[in-house]
Image (tube, grey):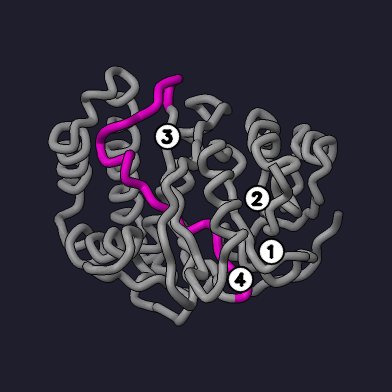
Amino acid sequence: MATVPLAVVILTYNEEPNIARCLDSVAGWAGQVFVLDSFSTDRTVQIARGRSADVHQRAFQGFADQRNWALAYLPFGFDWVLFLDADEWLSEPLKREIADRLSREGDGPVGYFLPRRHRFMGRWLRFGGLDRTRLLRLFRRERGRCESRLVDEHFVVDGPTAALRGDLLTEDRKGIGAWIDRHNRYARLEARELLRQRQVDGTRMRGRLWGSQPERKRWIRERLWNRLPLFTRPVLLFVYRYVLRGGFLDGGAGLVYHLLESFWYRLLIDLNYRELLRSGEIEAEAPPPLRAEARR
């Protein structure tokens, strides 16, 4: 397969168990591969450099901040950029589809949504709504930006978009303990985001009932979910995903995933939100400004 005229950007911090698979899926395929690392203390950087990735390092100040810094300061040689997480990799059908779309692009879409498939506890999850996840990850870099959110951030683009059919695959090899630690941090950030969500600027994705899948989810969250009573939301979401959307059909892996992600994680968000409200710790400040001190 010929080199595709795009740059891949991967954010990392201690991703030694995951990064090789991610890089191997784009090696020799993408025109450029950047790893923006937040000073990992494991072998992440060595593995990335060993696979000829262009490694830059910068202190982590949030996912949106890191991604927008990458768009502003990495030495891109192509108009198109594809953002990946370290625990993600591209399927062969998706690679062929991207190559085909970019080879005949004209005045068409400026961004593409990629369908993502999850593997959890060694099993591909097919039910519970996970088969419908669509993420805007591929776009013209001059037309896109990451919205200013503390967590659950999305890319927004100025122009038309389209959806691809090949799968973006994801599985975290760092184990369940790392998954729980990460979602514990995310829950605190999500609670803070609930307290500052009224401060919306032009880079933030707005919820729209008839918009893209992420815009519909944002509309449901802001207009319906956030107005439900605390502590009822995790129960309702678990019943919706695990029972009504058939998450139980994924067996034991489906049960564990939805107990953790649909129930425990959402309960943790509500507990953190209640704690912040009672403490008066309401933060509505914008994320810290972009800073250019990166090194290879």
On residue 11, the disc is 2
Q: Residues within 10 Å of mark 1 (few under 14, many from 20)?
A: many
Q: Residue at x 46, y 41 (%)?
A: 167
Report if the CB atoms under discs 2 and 4 are less than 8 Å apart: no
Residue 118's disc is: 3
Q: Name which residue type carries label 2.
A: Leu
Rendered position, 121 above or below 14: above
Query: In terms of sequence position, does the residue under pointer 4 or pointer 3 come before the other?
Result: 3
- Between residues 112 and 239, which one lies in front from this camera angle? 112
Amino acid type at circle 1 is: Ala
Q: Position of residue 82 (x, y in %)?
A: 60, 56
Give the image location of residue 137, x and y in percent. Answer: 52, 57
Queried whether the magenta region covers residue 131, the answer comes back as: yes
The residue beneath circle 4 is: 288
Disc 2 secondary structure class: strand
Q: In the rendered view, does 136 fall on the left or right side of 84?
A: left
In which quarter of the view is residue 145 placed?
A: bottom right
In contact (CB < 8 Å): disc 1 and disc 2: yes
Question: Label 1, label 3: how many angstroms apart (C-alpha)?
Answer: 26 Å
**Mark 4 vs 1, N-terminal side:** 1
Image position of 133 (left or right of 216): right
Of badges 4 and 1, the one in the foreground is 1
The foreground one among 49 and 165 is 165
Q: Secondary structure at mark 1?
A: helix
Q: Which range is magenta?
A: 120-142
